[in-house]
Image (cartoon, coloured by chain):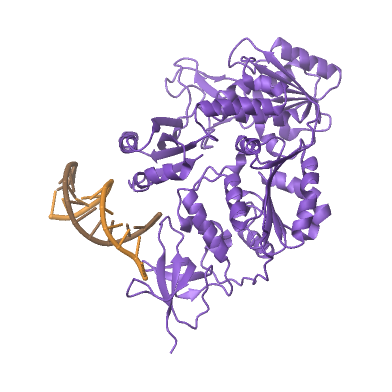
Chain colours: A purple, B brown, C orange
Amino acid sequence: MAQDKIAKVALPIALNREFDYSFGASAKIKPGMRVLVDFRARKTLAVVTAIKKESKITNLKSVLAALENNSSLTSEQIRFARILSSFYPYNFGEFLFMMLPSYLKRIRNVKIFPVGKLPNSEKTYQHKFMRADTFSQRYYLWRSQIKEKLETGSVLVCFPQVSYLNEAKKILDADFGPKIKVMHSYESEKDFFTNWQGSRQNSLILGTRVAIFCYPADLKMIIVEDENNYSYFQEEKPFYHLLQVAFLLSKFKKIDLILSSSLPALYTYKLIRDKKISLQEVAQNQRQIKVVQTQKYLKPAIISPVLGEILRKNIAENKKTVIFLNRKGFAPRIICSSCGQILACEHCTMPLRFLSQKNNAVCPSCAKVYQLPKICSHCNAGRLRLVGIGNERLEAKLKEIFPQANIAAWKNIKEQTQIAIATREIISSLYNPQVFDSGIVLDADRQMSFFDYEAVFETFIYLQKISLFCKNLVIFTHNSKHYLFSGLQTDWRAFYEAELKQRKALSLPPFGTLIKITLRLKDENKLFNKVSSLYNKLKPKVYEIYGPLKEHPFKLRGKFRYTLIIKGKNRRQLWEVIKDEVLHLRVAHLYLAIVVK
DNA sequence: AGCACGCCGACT
DNA sequence: GTCGGCGTGCTC
């Protein structure tokens, strides 16, 4: 008589435990398989993580059904999910279910194609950084390696954004057309699933950051294109950074990892400097960057005489100009001229932004749209004043001053456009180098003075990237002596060294670990009490802790937010110390966000 | 995570 | 009295 066997399963809930279910020995249930189980009197989707003969639990319920003929996850992926959950403060089950295409996260029967024989794993693997100004140049650096790896397995190329991926695909199609599979979250569930099935063996996968969790068993190499791009950080649970996951996966599978960009992320640079990864480089294109000292701090968008003169000259010589001002809409603030009230969002502590094209106001945080009253609804007397300069107002002002010129916002740009107005969004698109004769940056100061230790570095990357669009770049700043600007004039390494020196002095990443814990709750006082008590509990356990700090915006979508920042040397050790206090913090309607850098 | 259970203050 | 908010424990 056949004995029953036990399946250990993980469930798609934020619970750091697995559960045992029995099944008849004749049932074809294997690790990595999706099954249906009865959990708390509900039919629930579960993934089998192991098969065993015995369980400590008596009165086991039995597996209701297998939902597929072959396992959709490999045993290796199950092990990788465990590694991820030891590295990040999130549960094994959550990472495991991230590895499933959304189509498979529902209770449905599916046919899964079996995976054939896998290639032997390599004995050695390497991490490389490849630097060149443009995507085409970088592609030529790693193209032959894709070709080589595709002979025995699959290759994953990650892109920061779907638009970038689609542009790049046009170039890669010529070389690898039939082997290419695209995977990103903008696709329908069904399409993503179909592509995922097709990509499980011997494919060139082009994907956004989600694709790394759905990697095929025969993956031979990961390439991260534009590796310094900020979109690689996921700002939602589980707050991972694609580069970290790519490093973990490369070490786990012993496969090559190529990081590719116009300039390395700071963490990558430290690895290059410490000789942990190799550098291959194409010399930088010639470019001219000029820094202009301005008089009035934080008023960079006013068309100064210098700026007016540059534009007049460019128009006269029929040269193309792009102006960068990272502020959408017409005006960032709406103020009552009588009582001084600043119009703010109902759900966020955020001033409303006025949009002239739509003739309404919008909250920059939660995107709620408001129709504006004729007079101030606070004092019922004053008229509303539009304060500050956004892209729409800049465009209107320029059209006023240069009525003969062809001026357009970036999204309406045409062949004959002489002056384009752009935000930083364009740096995540694939571009043709030096399409503009002249580039002008109006709000470098605002970007580099954000309350964030990464602000200066991010601004440097931003300025370097936009300088690739233009034959020459002019930056207006109140702070022209800052090391950021001297760094733009010399070899890029000089700036990286200066930045590392600063980080080291303050033991900030990449020289230490930083854990940011954010608590969100509707009730402000209660939240403050909770965050304070957490602070007091953590304080004696750690060396450095700061807070509670108000997040910006303090109130977002109806919830107040406080943050604690904890600094330490060793990531895993620091997390072990604070883990219990943080994860056992269970308060009704309280939301936790934990970011580890 | 969700859901039940049980403790305690508020109120027709 | 009993309604309901919220901390606690449990799920194979």
| Residue at screen point 42% across, 23% down | A378
Residue A430 occupies which quadrant of the picture?
top right
The x, y position of residue A510, in whole percent, is 55, 35
The quadrant in which residue A474 appears is: top right
Image spot of residue A417 (x, y percent): 80, 28
Which one is nearer the viewer's eye here, A487 or A559? A487
On screen, residue A118 above or below A537 = below
Residue A529 in the figure: left or right of residue A493: left
Of all residues shown, which one is farthest toward the right? A317
Q: Is residue A100 visible?
A: yes
The residue drawn where x is 70% and y is 42% is A278
Q: How many marks?
A: 0
State whether residue A262 is above or below residue A418: below
Q: Position of residue A396 (x, y in %)?
A: 69, 22
Q: Is residue A290 above or below residue A571?
A: above
Quadrant in which the N terminus of chain A appears = bottom left
In percent of width and height, residue A258 lies at 69, 47
The answer, for residue A356, to whether it is visible in the render is no
Against A237, residue A103 (above or below) is below
- Work out whether residue A277 or residue A443 is closer to the camera in this orientation and state it: A277
A567 relative to A148 in the view: left or right? left
A80 lies left or right of A37: right
